[in-house]
Image: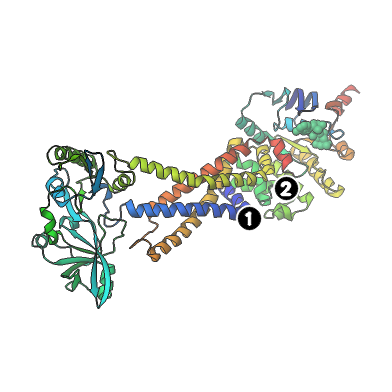
């Protein structure tokens, strides 16, 4: 049965080349755009190196102070706040404190390089999954002693040493010399809690440790023992914030806000004005709605094409009914045909998106982007295809299946 | 085996009302070869479509094997058509995207029959109409007469109890028409297939064993009744 359906589907596609082209173009283009967006999403928020265990990771990247006069002011939290209140939390397995990255100048062979530098503790390397190409992360001891060591990314190694081994070499950043102890694969800039070109021990910035305000230039990366601990950590974090509000508020401030969110949550909160509640669900809703709107037009288009495509086969519908196909069977046939068509379009879409992603990667629009079609993106694409195929196929099939057999036979007599 | 009881069919459009069939009562017995004649527009096709459960009468009902077919669901009607009835149309109505043998398999597609068995039965049916050499062809590669033979093979493939043929030779020249008529006669005589055929050709009608004449939606003559009266 299925083989028979596919046979005729294939024959019709070949016979109606123009329709086929328009349909396939619409489907593959739509899916291509959605796939690229999905891939971007996965790149920014999915479980990717070095935030591979994303379901166990929480980030603290914002401190908002609401003043009595009504205005608010927000920035990353201070080292003091993270060290004093976040590090001692009991539920997490581990907490890392690291600075926001800053642009620094560096000179190699009289050539100026602008690098992004980040100060981190040793826990940073335990919590995150960097891919070391050579060497190792810096140790607790090196951090404690404020040793001038650095981990650099692959791109920086290339710029400095032309892809030769870098461990043991010295680099000079902002007029300070560091010994390279490790080289890691490039981290995409969208992973802004982990990304840098050069990572050095946090203790080299110890002048920041003495300031006692809540706002500063630091992030915390929290790792849970298991994914199910995440809500508990958020709870503990919230009750810690109650204490902070009670005892450690700066003068003139009515309330301070800070949250431990997962990667998408931090993005949602900052995008949607940083309220008290988690905005992830809302942002997902907006994404889904945008995707829906985006798919609406091509779907309507495909529905119309399908109707005329099926309409010219009304004689076939009549014949099939005469020989024992029920309306349901007819619907089934046309839906199968349409899913076949959308899967074809989907495959094309995959190929095109692979090319487009490659282009984005090469273009350097997003630093160190390595957008790709992994299994997750592929699964989403497949799902989108099926939904697309169903939605655009069911209505025309339903409409045509209700054709009266006698009318159908008359309509298509040839 | 098929009984039409008080069948009325009225087509209503905004402006006019056409009575296509006016209280038709008719019984077709197993093994009969019935031909139906009458002027254009007198309701022959309408009658055949109702008999074949493709169309519903405005009033009255059809009974198959003594069972009234009145309140059947769409899928139950489809099943009856599939198992009991084979259609042959004036304009063949082959599916041009499918090969000859795939076309012939059509009625079996809607039954629980394996692919191999389907193919076997389709080839047998094609053999009966003398088209074993053309199974892989597509309909547009065949002559009109050959297409109609494929259509007959398709009607036969499901082994139906009755074949309903609406002007099966209407689009063919007389040589090809005779060929088709010979096949139908042989099916009726050798295999006992029940056939109801609409035709405009008096000579063909005379070869069948029962001739019904229609005029304006009503039977005006039935050779079987006439014989009985003589
Ligand atoms: N869908 C329809 N809507 C309105 N009137 C119809 C419809 N179908 C058939 N009729 C009318 O019903 C009457 C019978 O039509 P039918 O097709 O049964 O005639 P016929 O005897 O088969 O004619 P022919 O020999 O030309 O095929 C005709 O007057 C026709 O105009
Ligand atoms: Mg007719």
Q: Can you tell me whether the CB of the residue at mark 2 lies under 8 Å from the nearest atom of ligand 2?
A: no
> In the rendered view, does A355 fall on the left or right side of A125?
right
Q: Residues within 10 Å of mark 2 (few under 14, many from 20)?
A: many
Question: How far from the left and from the top, in percent, is residue A321?
Answer: 66, 38
The outermost residue toward the bottom is A109
- Residues at discs 2 and 1 both on one chain: no
Indicate which quadrant contains ligand 2: top right
* Image quadrant in which you'd find residue B110: top right
Kindly state the secondary structure of the residue where label 1 is placed. Answer: helix
Could you give the CA–CA distance between mark 2 and mark 1, rounded to whole angstroms?
A: 30 Å
- Vertical relation: B61 (above or below) A308: above
> In the rendered view, does A212 fall on the left or right side of A393?
left
Question: How far from the left and from the top, in percent, is residue A157?
Answer: 25, 71
Coloring scheme used: rainbow
Q: Kindly identify which numbered label has been placed on residue B150.
A: 2
Question: How far from the left and from the top, in percent, is residue B8?
Answer: 77, 24
Relative depth, front residue between B2 and A43: A43
Q: Residue at x 19, y 58 (%)?
A: A125
* Image quadrant in which you'd find residue B201: top right
Kindly state the secondary structure of the residue where label 2 is placed. Answer: helix
- Vertical relation: A162 (above or below) B49: below
Question: How far from the left and from the top, in percent, is residue A34?
Answer: 45, 51
Between label 2 and label 1, give the one nearer the viewer.
1
Q: Can you tell me whether the CB of the residue at mark 1 lies under 8 Å from the nearest atom of ligand 1?
A: no
* Quadrant into which the C terminus of chain B falls: top right
* Quadrant into which the N terminus of chain B falls: top right
Relative depth, front residue between A384 and A96: A96
Q: Residue at x 50, y 52 (%)?
A: A30
Relative depth, front residue between A331 and B86: A331
Q: Which residue is mark 1?
A: A18
Say whether residue A375 is visible: no
> In the rendered view, does A43 fall on the left or right side of A91?
right
């Amino acid at each position: 049965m299925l083989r028979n359906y596919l046979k005729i589907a294939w024959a019709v596609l070949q016979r109606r080349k123009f329709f086929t082209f328009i349909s396939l173009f619409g489907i593959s283009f739509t899916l291509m755009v959605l796939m690229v967006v999905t891939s971007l999403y996965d790149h920014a928020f999915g479980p990717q190196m070095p935030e591979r265990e994303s379901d166990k990771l929480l980030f603290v990247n914002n401190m908002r102070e609401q003043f009595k006069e009504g205005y608010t002011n927000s920035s990353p939290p201070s080292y003091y706040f993270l060290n004093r209140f976040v590090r001692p939390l009991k539920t997490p397995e581990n907490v890392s404190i690291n600075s926001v990255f800053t642009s620094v100048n560096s000179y190699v062979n009289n050539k100026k390089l602008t690098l992004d530098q980040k100060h981190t503790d040793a826990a940073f390397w335990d919590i995150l999954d960097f891919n070391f190409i050579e060497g190792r992360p810096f140790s607790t001891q090196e951090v404690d002693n404020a040793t001038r060591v650095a981990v650099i990314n692959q791109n920086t190694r290339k710029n400095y040493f032309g892809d030769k081994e870098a461990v043991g070499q010295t680099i000079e950043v902002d007029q300070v010399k560091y010994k390279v102890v490790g080289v890691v694969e490039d981290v995409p800039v969208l992973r802004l809690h982990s990304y840098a070109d050069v990572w050095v021990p946090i203790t080299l910035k110890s002048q920041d440790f003495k300031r006692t305000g809540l706002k500063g230039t630091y992030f915390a990366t929290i790792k849970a023992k298991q994914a199910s601990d995440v809500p508990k950590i958020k709870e503990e974090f919230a009750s810690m914030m109650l204490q902070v509000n009670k005892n450690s508020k700066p003068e003139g401030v009515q309330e301070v806000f800070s949250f431990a969110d997962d990667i998408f949550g931090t993005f949602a909160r900052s995008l949607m004005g940083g309220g008290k509640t988690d905005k992830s669900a809302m942002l997902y809703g907006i994404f889904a709605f945008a995707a829906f709107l985006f798919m609406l037009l091509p779907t309507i288009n495909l529905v119309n094409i399908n109707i005329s495509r099926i309409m010219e086969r009304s004689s076939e519908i009549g014949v099939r009914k005469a020989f024992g196909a029920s309306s349901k069977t007819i619907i089934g046939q046309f839906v199968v045909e349409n899913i076949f068509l959308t899967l074809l379009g989907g495959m094309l879409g995959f190929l095109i998106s692979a090319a487009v992603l490659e282009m984005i990667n090469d273009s350097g629009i997003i630093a160190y982007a390595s957008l790709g079609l992994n299994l997750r993106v592929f699964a989403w694409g497949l799902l989108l295809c099926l939904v697309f195929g169903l939605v655009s196929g069911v209505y025309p099939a339903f409409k045509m299946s209700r054709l009266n057999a006698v009318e159908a036979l008359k309509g298509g007599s040839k | 085996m098929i009984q039409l009881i008080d069948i009325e069919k009225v087509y209503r459009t905004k402006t006019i009302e056409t009575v296509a069939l006016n209280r038709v009562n008719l019984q077709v017995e197993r093994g009969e070869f019935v031909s139906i004649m009458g002027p254009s527009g007198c309701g022959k096709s309408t009658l055949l479509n109702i008999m074949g459960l493709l169309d519903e009468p405005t009033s009255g009902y059809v009974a198959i094997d003594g069972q009234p077919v009145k309140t059947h669901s769409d899928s139950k009607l489809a099943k009856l058509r599939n198992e009991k009835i084979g259609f042959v149309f004036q304009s063949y109505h082959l599916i041009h995207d499918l090969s000859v043998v795939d076309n012939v398999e059509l009625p079996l597609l809607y039954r629980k029959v394996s692919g191999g068995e389907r193919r076997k039965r389709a080839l047998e049916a094609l053999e009966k109409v003398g088209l074993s050499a053309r199974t892989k062809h597509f309909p547009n590669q065949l002559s009109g007469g050959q297409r109609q033979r494929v259509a007959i093979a398709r009607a036969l493939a499901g082994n139906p109890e009755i074949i309903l043929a609406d002007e099966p030779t209407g689009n063919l020249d007389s040589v090809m028409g005779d060929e088709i008529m010979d096949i139908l006669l042989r099916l009726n005589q050798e295999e006992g297939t029940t056939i109801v055929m609409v035709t405009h050709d008096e000579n063909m009608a005379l070869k069948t064993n029962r001739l019904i004449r229609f005029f304006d939606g009503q039977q005006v003559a039935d050779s079987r009744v006439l014989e009985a009266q003589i």
